[in-house]
Amino acid sequence: MDFAFDYNIFRLMFNMMFFITIGMFAFIIIKNIKTWNQNNHSPRLDVEAEVVSKRTDVSFNNHMGGNASMVLPGPTIYYAAFQVESGDCMEFKISGTEYGQLAIKDRGKLSFQGSRFLSFNRYF
């Protein structure tokens, strides 16, 4: 084994990891732009619906420093599932405020555009 051979392998591995990382970022950005564009070109729909479930997705961040490690809560993502008149069930990402105001079995007018939640107005 000579030094030039080892250096070339290191350079090849570094370049591969660099392009894989750039490719992953490009894929995620293109996918998000595609979803955003599809939502913008979808019609806005207002339908009768009932809240059938709610859930949260909490991520955690691990911080290691010195001899101690801490697990801190990260951002929380809120979801609500609605059943519409046709019997179809749809789940949307919603804000924390909207999540707190919804209760299972609430009935009302659901407004959405593609996969984008717009609003839910409860009937009293």
Image: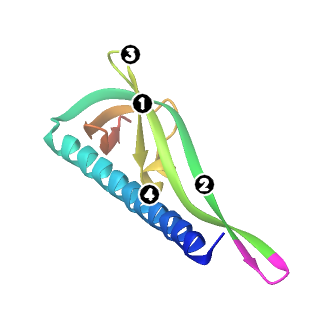
Q: Which residue is mark 2?
A: 58
If you read the primary sequence from the N terminus, does the residue marked by circle 3 or circle 1 appear first? 1
Q: CA distance from mark 2 to mark 4?
A: 28 Å
Disc 2 versus disc 1: nearer the observer: 2
Q: CA distance from mark 3 to mark 1?
A: 10 Å
Q: Which residue is mark 1?
A: 82
As shown in the figure, which amino acid type bears the numbered disc 1? Phe
The span shown in magenta is: 63-68
Q: Which residue is mark 4?
A: 20
Q: Is residue 120 left or right of residue 39?
A: right
As shown in the figure, which amino acid type bears the numbered disc 3? Gly
User: Which residue is rendered at x = 41% and y = 48% of the image?
Assistant: 94
Disc 2 versus disc 3: nearer the observer: 2
If you read the primary sequence from the N terminus, does the residue marked by circle 2 or circle 1 appear first? 2
| Local SS, label 2 | strand
Q: Which residue is mark 3?
A: 87
- Density class for disc 2 (Cα within 10 Å; few <14, some 14-19, many ≥20) is few
Q: CA distance from mark 1 to mark 4?
A: 38 Å
- Density class for disc 1 (Cα within 10 Å; few <14, some 14-19, many ≥20) is many
Q: Quadrant of residue 3?
A: bottom right
Q: CA distance from mark 4 to mark 3?
A: 43 Å
| Local SS, label 1 | strand
Q: CA distance from mark 2 to mark 3?
A: 29 Å
Would you place residue 117 above or below residue 66 in this image? Answer: above
Percent across and percent down for residue 7 are 55, 74
| Local SS, label 3 | loop
